[in-house]
Image (cartoon, helix red, strand yellow):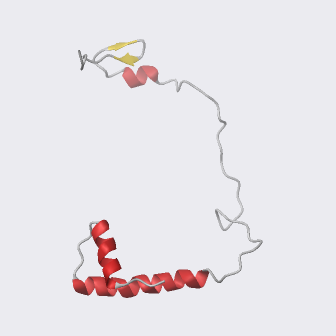
């Protein structure tokens, strides 16, 4: 797969990036080099290789999945001008 100048300009326009003709030509070469490297990586045989999250084996730190109220309701509504039963009271918007 290769990228032409029109594709570079279209991607730049979609990304809202202003590019000059010289920059677009340089980006065309850079993108084609990157895509060539990615195509080269697809040739690597990865059968039997497990995905890794780190180069050193380690267990992920996990918290227990329990439901709590957060114990912060009073802190959350503490600065509100009006509250009732830990709910914010706001003026009526629609009639």
- In the rendered image, residue 24, in percent from the top left (x then y), is placed at 29, 82
Q: How many marks?
A: 0
Residue 51 or 25: which is nearer the viewer?
25
User: Which residue reaches farthest top?
Assistant: 84
Seen from the viewer's position, the closer of residues 62 and 51 is 51
Q: Is residue 52 shown left or right of residue 85?
A: right
User: Residue 60: horizontal and vertical position, in percent?
Assistant: 67, 52
Q: Quadrant of residue 94?
A: top left
The percent position of residue 58, horizontal first and vertical second, equals 70, 58
Residue found 27% across the figure and 83% down from its top: 23
- The residue positioned 52% from the left and 23% from the top of the image is 71
Q: Is residue 65 left or right of residue 88?
A: right
Image quadrant in which you'd find residue 26: bottom left
**What residue is shown at x 64% (from left), y 64% (from top)?**
54
Give the x, y percent position of residue 46: 71, 76
Residue drawn at (64%, 31%) of the image: 66
**Which image quarter holds the C terminus?**
top left
Q: Is residue 8 left or right of residue 1?
A: left
Q: Quadrant of residue 38?
A: bottom right
Residue 29 vs 82, above or below: the answer is: below
22 vs 65: above or below? below
């Amino acid at each position: 797969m290769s990228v032409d100048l029109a594709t570079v300009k279209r991607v730049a326009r979609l990304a809202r990036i202003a590019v000059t003709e010289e920059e677009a030509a340089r980006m065309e070469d850079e993108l084609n080099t990157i895509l060539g490297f990615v195509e080269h990586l697809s040739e690597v045989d990865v059968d039997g290789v497990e995905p890794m999250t780190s180069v050193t084996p380690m267990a992920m730190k996990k918290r227990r999945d329990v439901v709590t109220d957060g114990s912060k309701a009073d802190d959350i509504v503490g600065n509100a001008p009006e509250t009732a039963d830990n709910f914010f009271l706001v003026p009526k918007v629609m009639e």
